[in-house]
Amino acid sequence: MVFTVDCDVHVNDTPGALAPYCDLPWRHSLEDLDGANYPYLQIPGFAPNFRLDPPIRGMHPYRSVNTAREMREELTEIGVDVGILFPDHLLLFAAIPHPEYALFLSRAYNRWLLDRWLRDEPGLYGALLACPQDPEGSARDIEEFAREDRIVAIYLPTAGVNPLWGHRRYDPIFAAAEAADLPVVLHSVTIVSPVFPCQLEQFENHFARQMLGHSFAMMANLVSIMHTGVPARFPNLRIVFTEAGIAWAPYMKWRLDKYYHEYRRMVPVLERRPSEYMSERIWVSTQPIEEPDDPNHLVETIRHIGEDRVVFASDWPHHDFDHPRALLRLPMPQDLKRKIMGENALRVFTRIPAPSAVGADSEERA
Amino acid sequence: MAEHVIGTIDDFPPGSSRLVKVRNVEIGVFNVGGTLYALPNICPHQAGPLCEGTVNGTMICNAATEWKHQWVRDGEFLTCPWHGIEFEIATGRALANPRLRVRQYPISVDQGLVKITL
């Protein structure tokens, strides 16, 4: 059995669940949103999104995980030893315009995560929700919450973030993450909003928007982070890009290098090629893993990115989740499988103990 | 291999850049702060006419400059006219890519005559 770290699983963060963890006056807002039975990723004032599609019968079911116990059982069921928890609805957190409400809400989520998800069950770790609407306030919260040892990352909400991550206004968040020795994880979701990537409303259906939402977000935020020199200015910061698959990464790596040739004097803050920063301190997670007819093409793509740069993610319990076997069945050597499924993640999320420390637990479940 | 006289030292004053032809090979001759360098007029990137480019300083921005932009080392870098890649004349090294390097021809001054070995 391959030790498996899942870098992206989602907890069901409803307004009602978070309300008791939110300070006044904004607690009342969450209380008033509670119980309205809003659909996934479309709660006014909480998960703002412009949803356009009519329902079509026979679509995939909507799944959510509501307790740490459920999460532990379900991850074990699919063969995951360690899961790193991210929100559901607050994937749209960055689209919330009000900075004070947003900071209170992020604090409530982080408290709730620590209290309800990271206390009892083994192998569950958390990513703190950063608040791009108030970078200074968020940096102070990161400093405080990062003392908890089950916190292993800082989640940078990416859908609807404006300006993009990399803008200098977010420097306090990057500085706080670097000081806490925690990686930042960019996670997007398909959103129709007036900010990047905008004009997605022109597509007739979600199929089309899904093609571009995540991948454009990752590409644009990578470029943003590069062009302001984040990897140079924060030389110990580790950066992870999630939920856009992996094949976009070689394209961007080669394209950044190509134009660095011409435009280096515009970005002298990068003292090496963008690919060199990427090959040292940037990782991409696998889900939704591409499924070419010839799986060798995918293995080749992994090698283009770097055998040490790819980390497994399932995105459990979402509709497009990847079972670990989606990676384990690929035609690649066992040592590469071990890297992708867990060893690479342990080098990013350094607070997660190595498998020897949780070995008894793994064997029991195997 | 033979030495070829390409002119006198007065033809290549400090700060100058000139294109010469030796045995049908185009060579750029650059005087950077009193030292002569001879580079082939072929960019190692995509074979553009490298030595027809301009000679400039370059921009830096790092911890030593407190992350402010600074223009430095005027006259030490050659920019290829095709893709704008900057080469450090003294080393032939491309600033944007350590794997990209333009070679140098031996160049010397002997009794006021400038000679290239080719």
Image (cartoon, rainbow, N blue to C red):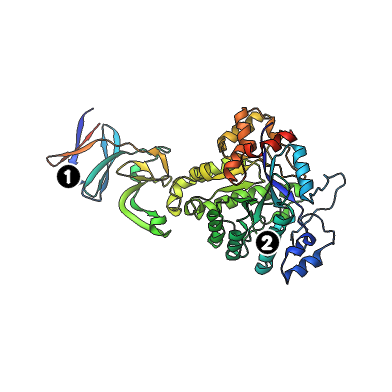
Tell me if B76 is positioned left or right of A48 in this view.
left
Q: Residue furthest right?
A: A57
| Residue A106, numbered label | 2
Nearer to us in this view, A160 or B111: A160
Does residue A279 lie above or below A233 as drawn?
above
State the SS at label 1: helix
Residue A193 can be seen in this image: no
- Chain of the residue under label 1: B
Name the quadrant of the N terminus of chain A. top right
Viewer-nearest of labels 2 and 1?
2
Residue A308 lies, in percent from the top left, at 56, 37
Residue farthest along the bottom direction in this orientation: A25
The reply to whether discs 2 and 1 touch (Cβ–Cβ < 8 Å) is no
Image coordinates of residue B102 in percent, x first then y, are 35, 38
Q: Is any part of residue A76 visible from this angle?
A: yes
Q: Which mark is residue B9?
A: 1
Of residue A174 and residue A276, the one placed in the foreground of this image is: A174
Please rate how many residues cluster around mark 1, counting C-alpha atoms within 10 Å: few if below 14, some from 14 to 19, many from 20: some
Q: Quick one: A273 or A237, which is closer to the camera?
A: A237
Q: Chain of mark 2?
A: A
Q: The C terminus of chain A is located in which quarter? A: top right
Q: Residue at x 41, y 56 (%)?
A: B63
Task: Specify the amino acid type for callout 1.
Answer: Ile
